[in-house]
Amino acid sequence: MEKQHKLDRWLLASVTGLIILGLMAIYSATNGTGDTSLFYRQLAWSLFGVIALAVVYYNDIRIVRDNAYIFYAIGLLLLIAVLIFGRKIAGQTSWMKIGFFSFQPSEIVKMATILALARYLSDENTDIHSIPHLFIALATAFIPMMLIMLQPDMGTMLTILPYVATMLIMAGFDIYIMMLMTFPFILMIAGFFNIYIVLALTFLLILILFFKRKKFQLHQFFVIGPGLAAGFFMNRFANEILKPHQIKRIQTFIDPMSDPQGAGYNALQAKIAISSGGLWGKGFLAGTQTQLRFIPAQWTDFIFCVIAEELGFIGASLLITLYLILILRLIATIFAITNKFVQLTLGGFVSLMFVHVVINVGMTIGLIPVIGVPLPLVSYGGSSLVGNMIMVGLALNFFRNKRNLGYHSSVLTRKKSAP
């Protein structure tokens, strides 16, 4: 008889490896500063995250599903509260402090929104092709997005859109219609980059032809027209819409040398740190860019630079491999379990994790503008760490209860041939 494991060891091992790498990088990044509190705080958050993971792992998943809307409502209340009582840091009012305890509500809301959206889309009475039902699903995501924008926190808001689109498509929404709905937003964002709007429009037109393989239809012009208008509007009035530091980030993304000692400083120093690591790295606690503090706050958004410089290409590859194992195990669980709520929840988590990794690594190597997105399970930050640990706990819970959730054993395990 085939032995069934109740614990996804590969998933747990990858998460453990990422947390260890994160703690090492945070210790190195703060070494010699005289303030070791950040490392010990992250260590304490890691232990708290393990407890949260264990609680979720041994809990009944029906409790999570039945209370998804309550978690979502609490998240919205926290987003409203942070706008009123939150602390303003680096131009953003995104942190709340209760006594000695500080946290970022938007990190919690991302997880709560995934659960609420999964609960709604998995309801047998929900018809995603119905306009009212689609509107409710979109509103579930856009309400927290608008509250996050008021902080303002563009980076966090941008990480919500991909998992909403992923979950809607998994729920049966037409991918072509989804593509058309995103056109105006893509063209609007491209409008900030002048020539990029032409490239974006060309790419989108090719996608239309690829999916429909027909001549253009009237509804396509109704989508492309407003999108172009929004793009040119943003191109013309970007200075009035964006904050000065956001404009600087866009300018230095296009040309970091336009402000090498200002907005382009972090991006340039990050590239130097990564490229100087070589194959094996300079050694733990031996990275010059890291130890001499050339990159401010390198234990948060630019923590990938610390790992790449001190552990080299091998260390950076190990980090990416651990993320790859984590994501592939989650995807395997999606295909192995037929429960719709489980599939949608894991689909949202996979998309959120993937987007965070791509954006964070992309901005450190200069492929994406610096927008302040942490590296999951690695960057310093208790809210993000605990939130991700809770989602990992859910994934482990789903794996443990896979037989009760509709299980295809051949997806996650390899059956032994009969003797």
Image (cartoon, rainbow, N blue to C red):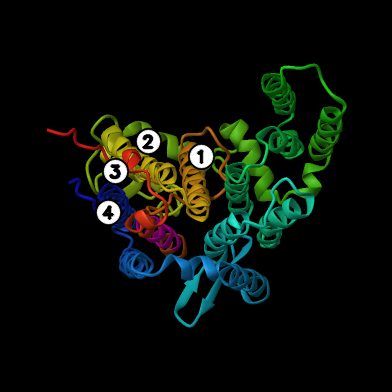
Cα–Cα span, label 3 and label 2: 10 Å
Q: Main secondary structure of the magenta part?
A: helix
Of the numbered discs 4 and 1, the one sitting upstream in the chain is 4
Q: Most extreme residue toward the bottom, as rendered? A: 99
* Residue at 58 percent of width and 39 percent of height: 369
Mark closer to the observer (3, 2) = 2
Q: Quadrant of residue 286?
A: top left
Identify whether 305 is placed above or below 176: below
Provide the secondary structure element on which disc 3 rests. loop
Q: Which residue is mark 1?
A: 363
Q: Are marks 2 and 1 in contact (CB under 8 Å)?
A: no
Provide the secondary structure element on which disc 4 rests. helix
Percent across and percent down for residue 101 are: 46, 77
- The reply, left or right, for residue 371 in relation to residue 333 is right
Q: Which residue is mark 3?
A: 287
Q: Which residue is mark 4?
A: 20
Identify whether 386 is placed above or below 296: below
Identify whether 318 is placed above or below 167: above
Q: Which residues are magenta?
A: 387-396
Cα–Cα span, label 2 and label 1: 12 Å
* Residue at 29 percent of width and 30 percent of height: 278
Cα–Cα span, label 4 and label 2: 20 Å
Q: Which residue is mark 2?
A: 274
Identify whether 237 is placed above or below 225: below
Q: Quadrant of residue 320?
A: top left
Q: Amino acid at mark 4?
A: Ile
Percent across and percent down for residue 285 are: 24, 49
